[in-house]
Image (cartoon, helix red, strand yellow):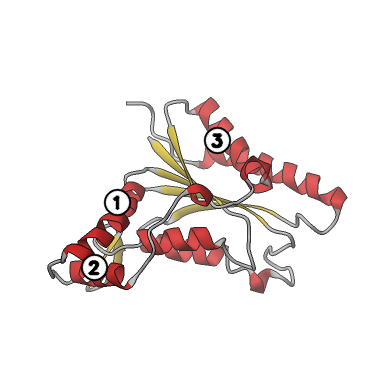
Amino acid sequence: MRLLHIIATTRGEQSRTLSISREFLQTLNEKHPHVTVDELDLSKTELPPVLDSTVKAKYLMMFGGELDEQTMESWKKVSALAENFISYDLFLITAPMWNFSIPYMLKHYIDVIMQAGILFSFTANGPEGFAKYEQMVCITSRGSDYSLGSPMHVLDHQEPYLRAVFRLSGIEDIHFVHAQPMDMAPGLTQTVLEKAKEEARKLVDKLKILPAA
């Protein structure tokens, strides 16, 4: 099995969110060493811009049109990233909350890969995703407490968005680990961080990992 780790933080190894993901990956490696892990660090990746030529190519591909040289070049860059994504079995997203939602680099990546014909198709019954059997883990950190029942919960546009957009690709089995609140009090931060790391380690046992071939 192959896991794609999508990193959406600009702080590198100083990231508190990434430190939780490292615990998850270490436990995964200890229990399932046959799972290979590839990293895609979005802060170091030049993503293709979603320009008019890209949008034109998208609709031409959807409706059976022919691409000219310009639209073909745009489409190659976009489709390569989308096809790379769909080739994996497991996904790990490391994403701190930014302004109640996700970092802009992750939104850019999602806008690039969510392509009809590669990740999903339109049917008479609505969109049908091609990644129906894949699993995803999203590890986040938030400055405040956005958990259910808290006054800030209504402002959590991070988890609902990630669930909705990746369901479009067919991924229903999505797990979240939220480190929150991280910035309310210095004494609380480390406690919250350690709790999230423990939750991430335990989450490995909940995943459906196929044995080595």
Amino acid on which disc 1 is placed: Ala
Q: Which residue is mark 3?
A: 25
Q: Which residue is mark 1?
A: 80
Identify the image quadrant of residue 111.
bottom left
Q: Which mark is residue 57?
A: 2
Q: Is residue 130 visible?
A: no
Give the secondary structure at mark 1. Answer: helix
Identify the image quadrant of residue 76.
bottom left
The relative height of residue 191 versus residue 25 in the rendered view (above or below) is below
Between marks 3 and 2 in the image, the one whose residue lies nearer the viewer: 2
Mark 3 crowd level (few <14, some 14–19, many ≥20, 10 Å Cα): many
Q: Identify the mark nearer the N-term, 1 or 3.
A: 3
Foreground residue among 210 and 9: 9
Q: Name which residue lies at 49% across and 53% down.
A: 174
Mark 1 crowd level (few <14, some 14–19, many ≥20, 10 Å Cα): few
Residue 213's spot in the image, x, y percent?
32, 26
Q: Name which residue lies at 29% across and 67% down.
A: 54
